[in-house]
Structures are given as structure tokens and as C-alpha cells.
Image: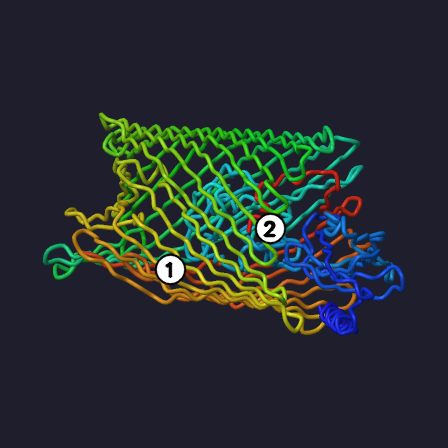
Amino acid sequence: MIKKIIFSLVIFISIELVAQRPGGSGGGILPEGIVKGVISDSHSGKPMEYANIVLFNVRDSSMVTGGVTANDGSFELEKIPFGRFYLEIYFIGFNRLTIGDIRVTPNNKLVNLGLIKLDPAMQSLEAVEVTAEKQHIEFQIDKKVVNVSQDLMAQGGTAVNALENTPSVTVDVNGDVSLRGSSNFLVLVDGRPSVLQGSDALQQIPASNIDRIEIITNPSAKFDPDGSAGIINVILKQKKESGVNGIFNLSVGTKKKFNTDFLLNYRQGKFNFFAGAGYRDFNSGGRRKSIQEAYLNDTTRYLFSAGDRKMHRTGYNLRGGIEYFMTDKTYLSFNGEYGEFDFSHGFTSHQEEYTSPESLKRNLLTQNNSTRERAYYRLSLNSQHKFDEKGQQIEVMVNYSDNTNNSFEDQSESLTDENWQIIDPNPYKIKTLEPGEGTNWRFKVDYVNPLSEKAKLEAGYQARIEQSKDDYDFMFWDMLINEWIENPLYSNKMEFDNDIHSIYGIYSDQTKKFGYQVGLRTEYNYRRIINLKSETPALIDRWDFFPTLHLSKTFDNNDQIQASYTRRINRPRGWSLDPFVMYIDAYNRRRGNPNLKPELTDSYELAFQKRKWGSLFSFEAYYRYTTDKITRIRTLESDGTFLYTFENVNNDYSLGTELMVNTSLWKWFELNVTGNLFHYRIKGDLEGNMVDNESMNWNIRTNAMFKLPHDFRLQINTSYNGPSITAQGTMEGFFMSSIALRKELFDRKLSISASMQDILKTAKWENTSSGIGFYSKDIMKPDFRFLMFNLSYKINNYKRHRFNDQPEMQNTDMNVDDF
């Protein structure tokens, strides 16, 4: 970075000296021409920011002018005199490139060199291949990019672990992911919707299979508007070079943790084949305590509970595909995925219940065991065709997914003495069975038509057809006949149909320093819920409109400011719509609300990035306003049980700022510090009572990377999430830290590493809630400290590159001209 800054200063001073020559540099000829182009990495295809551009006169090799590329890789040299020139392009870690025979004449004043590709420089240093490295986190004009391979902590984990030290993202002690404080985000895998949703989807993707993760908080109208917080797009590894290559990963951890996966690729001529598989077996646990107070007329019931919980995740996935490059303009691919996973949860607790003033007391030993099994598969057909006109193209995607799931839960409750010895030989026992299945069809067409050199029009259509069926069977153990008996009061069947048809249009243009994009997406939604216990189905038949606006301004020093506005939607899920009462345990019930309306969020962002002193400074301000906020409500029933339901009772507001500094103080040390500060307010009417809660929330995280001798790397991460509020209570903050060490061997073909999570054992989740007639507090202390040992081997020195003739199929990569 220092070398680039010094080199840029030399160019700038030289340009100033040239500009001050008497009569100008063209021997008295008025400068009138323009030389322009775009620089990109020949391997990744990504635009190269801050590449140095110098224009020389062929006659005497004197420098005429120069500059550096913008963050979209573009450059434009103005006021060029008529004559013959050659251009040199420099960038640290890449081969120098010279372009000759550039002619600027009265009949050819504008010289457009088009797309120019630079090759990474590779040199042998003590038998070790040295190439330019990616940063762990990259800021692009429309998104943040997390390069997972640069994060030692993620090795042996999942996509959730890769996101733990990422701007805009927080991960709680349960592994649940939030994007700027909201769990309502859309998960894409290679630009396609995941079969699973939210944190469940991210928990199933091994980090070793991931090339990068894109975080898009204000997407354009091209993307699905689902997820009020934005989009998390996971790009999987896939090799594109000729021959056979691949990668194998193995991870073993303390406390019964195991993970392995592989990916193989074979390319021959116009065909590319790939296949991969992964298996994961992960155990975890912790301790949980809770306090509940229920105020029933003149009596208060107290319930104290404490116990240990155990969790076990296991599963495997298979994926493969074929790609056919028919011509240099037409691309066709077919790929599929199949997977199964189980998640089991066991909780044994000691409960102490008593009432006041009667002082009735009893001790209970409760056991709760649940298992969720899921199998899924996905098939996808994709095609892209580029027309003769540069930039004009059409993409078609057909995607089908199918999933089946079975959930089982059994509970037992035994009366004990004060020493927790069972005194009742006939415990109260119940169990629930929840089989279900669902299908999802998706058809999508995207078209791009360039109207001029920088202006373009985009349009598309998408159809989503979703269907699901779910059963819920509740049974209790009859001690008299020793059989399980179904209880029809808590048993039900539900069918869910959801059709969404979308069309969108986007117009974008760009001048020398200013760019803009205007878009509109329109969606028609028809939703039907059929409940066995309801005579009439619950219907939604509505249109929604989602405008988007993106602006960008580039300053003379290449600093850039961006502003954007989007509207997003969060549609309620099936289980929150089912109106029948579901039994949770002896003290809790749950009921959905078929009349729930979707949340609508208006999101505004302002971003500024500056490079100075070898560092990157990023500042983002954002404001989100959500109407018809879906809120989980807990009420105390007349029989002393709690009922959880859902209502559109609130609006919420988030106003915040996100700061990031990425600096390399020395060659052997890199530091990334990210902070997020936002004011959150939730306001509405809750059971006739006005709710108006607000809090100042914040989090900060650091990522320190040390480059040690002999190809060792040391990484230390810390994070703190401050307190926050909910509609009926508060959540306390928590601190976590982790450390990892990696060593590379055999020309970087073999990598071994070790990591430890929660070094100081500070991870803790604590929340309180209160309402009419109740107060509760929950504390959970997970057992997060464990060691993980990882091994990764590259077959034929696997790296993810793209051939120059291969079209980029990830439809989430927005072109910089969009802005």
C-alpha cells in the first residue's frame, strides 16, 4: 500500500511538471483527445481499483499524463494532444502491461481501449510461490465481500463462523445470525435462493466449501425484496481450469466435533464437471437458568428452573454439475444438490415451583428431548447468451427444490423430593410428531440492453410457486392402559400455497464523476392457508411495489460517496400463520395468526470510503423504518399458562452508523476494527397499552492478523455486542474472543491449523421480559470453549480462477455502471 501511494505521488508530481511546460506538451497543438478503458484481474475478472496508468509519447518517451483507476477499474485521461502514444499499467503484485500504437487524431479524438486484463505476478522465493493476497473483507460499491479463505477462525466451521467477524453482521451464542440487528434477511447460494432459510441455511454450509460471502444491505430491484435487512449471498468454490483439480478438508475438535468435505473438478475443452460432498458431526452444550413470576389475582406463582442442555447437529450433502460453453457467447449449466441433516436437543432441568401467599411448593424433574430431521434436494438449469452488441445479454434460470422434514419431541415430568429423588413412579409424559413436506418452483429471466456507452436498461420476470403440507400430532401417555393417546385439541393439519409473480425494470447511467440507478419491482402475491379446523381458508391477494434508487459521486482524489434507498418486505412464515393452539410444555402454548400482514421496510444508506496512509476508512450511515412489525406476544391466560402469538402491532426505527478501519501498520501485521452504533425504537399498541421502547445499541469487533516467519499465520478476534431491547423486555450484552494459528507446507498445497473459540469463557445470553401479569428472566451459558484442528490439501494446487472466455454466472454481481 505504501509503495502504491508513493508511486501515485510520483506520477502526480510528474504530471504537474509536464502540465507547466511552456506551450504544453504537444508542441503547441491544443490537447483535445481522450484515452479511456477498464482494468480487471485476468483471473478473478474483478475490476482493479488504484491501478496506476501512465501515457507516454512515442517520439521521445516523455510522460504526457497519468492517474489511477476508480473503484470500478475505469480510467479516463483527458486533454491528450494529437499524436502517437503508448500506455503503461502498473499494480503491485501484477505484471506490468504496455499497450502500444495509441493514435489520437482529429478524426479519432476518443480512444476507448475497452477491457484490459492484468495477470498476477508470480515469482519463486525460497521455493514458495508468492502472489498478491486478498483482504479478509473487501468493500465494493454495492456490497461487502468476505473472503472466507483468509479467515483462520472459519476453518472447520460453517458459514455462521465465517460471518462472526464481519461488518453489519452479529452472531449470538446460539449461532443465530442478525444483519444490522435484524434476523429478517434472505440467504442466496451462488445467487439462487437457499432451500433452507436464515441461520438454518448458513449452519449447513461448510466454511471450507465457500469462496466468498457477499453482504448486500440495499439490493437493487433485480433481487428478491424478501428480508427487510438485506441479502447474504454465499458463493461456493468451483475450479475452472483444465484438467483435474480439487480440495480436501478435514477438521477434528474436542468435545466430539468432526467435519470433512471435498470438491473435485474436471475441465476438458468446452465442458466442465464438478462434484463434492461433505459430512458434519457437531456436539455442543451449556447450562440454562430461568425465573418466571405469574400474577394470578391475589396469588403469585414462582417457577425456578435450572439444568443442562445438549445439542447435536449431524448431516451430509452431495452436489455436482456440468457446464457447457457452447460458444464464446452462450453458456449452459445444470447442477444439483442433495442433503440430509438432523438436529437434536436435550434439556434436563430441576424445577422448583411455589405460590405466595399459600406457600404451595413442589419440586419437579423435567426432561425434554427433540429431534428435527430434514432431507432436501435442488435442481437448477441456467443459461446465458451474449448478443453481438457489447453488454447486451439474456439469462434464464429454472430452479426446483423439494424438502421433507420430521420433528419429534417427548417430555416427561416427575415429582421429586427436596433432594431431587423421584417420589412419583408414574411421570406425566407427552410427545409430538410434526411431519411435513414442501416444494418450490422458480423461473427467472433477466435481460440487459445497453442504450449507450454507459447507460443501460435492465428488465426481468420471475415466478415463484411454493407449496407445503404440515401435520401436528399431540399425544399423551395413558398410564391406565399403557398406550399413547392422541389429543385432538392440540392436533392439526395445514396446507400452504404461495405464488409470487414479479417484474422489474432498472435504468442506470454514469457521467465522469456521477452515477445513478433507478429501479422499480412489482410483485403480485396470492397466498392460501387451509386449516383442518377452519371452515374457510385464509387468503392474501395483493400487489406490492418496491422502488430503488442508487447514487454515487467520485471526487478528484478518487474518494467516493454513495447513497441508496430501497423498499423491502418480510412475509410471515407458515408456522406463524397457523391459527391452532400448539402445546409447548405444561406452562406454555403457541398460536399463529392467519391475518398477519407482511412487514414493509424503507431503508436508506449513505456510505463514504477513503484510502489514506496505507489504510482504508469506511463510514456508513443508515436509517430503516418498518411498518406492521410482526411481534411475538406473550400473554398470561386465566389457567396460569402463557400463550405466545404474533401480531402486527408495532412500527420500529433504526438509525445508526457503521465505521471500519483496515490498516497494515507493518508488513507482518494487519488490523481490522469495525464498530456499529445505532438507536433502535419500537412503538405501537400492545393489548390496548402503548408501547414505546428505545435503546442505544452498539457492537465492536477486532481482527488482528500476524504474518510470522516460516509461513505461520496467527489470528486473534474479539467482539462485544451491547445490550438491546425487545417489544416486551431487554437483552444483555456479551463478549467473545478466539485465536487461531495456521502453517502452510509443500508449496502451499497442505495447510494445517488450530483454533480455540471463546478463550475467556465469557459467552452468555441473558434476557428479561414482562407484561400484564408476568415477569421472566432467562440466562444461558453455552459451552463454547473448544479446540479445533484442521487440515486442507489442494489437488493440483487448487485455486478458484475463471477462464477469460467464461461468462460470470453469479447474478448477484452488479455492474458498477448500475450506479
Q: Which mark is residue 654?
A: 1
Describe residue 721's horizontal placement relative to residue 813 as left or right: left
Give whichever of 657, 645 is nearer the camera: 657
Residue 483 in view, yes or no: no
Residue 63 in view, yes or no: yes
Question: Three-letter amino acid code at disc 1?
Answer: Ser
Give the spatial CA distance, label 2 vs label 1: 28 Å
Question: Three-letter amino acid code at disc 2?
Answer: Val
Task: Say which element carries label 1.
Answer: strand
**Quarter of the view holding residue 276:** top right
Density class for disc 2 (Cα within 10 Å; few <14, some 14-19, many ≥20) is: some
Give whichever of 416, 385 is nearer the camera: 385
Describe residue 646's horizontal placement relative to residue 515 as left or right: left
From the image, which quarter does the N terminus lie in? Answer: bottom right
Where is residue 326? Give x, y as percent.
72, 28
How many marks are shown on the rendered structure? 2
Where is residue 724? Give x, y as percent.
36, 63
Describe residue 615's horizontal placement relative to residue 26 as left or right: left
Residue that badge 2 annotates? 816
First reached walking from the N terminus: tag 2 or tag 1: 1
**Quarter of the view holding residue 788:** bottom right
Where is residue 568? Give x, y as percent.
41, 46
Where is residue 373? Give x, y as percent.
47, 36
Image vertical order of residue 108 relative to residue 224, above or below: below
Q: How is the image coloured?
A: rainbow
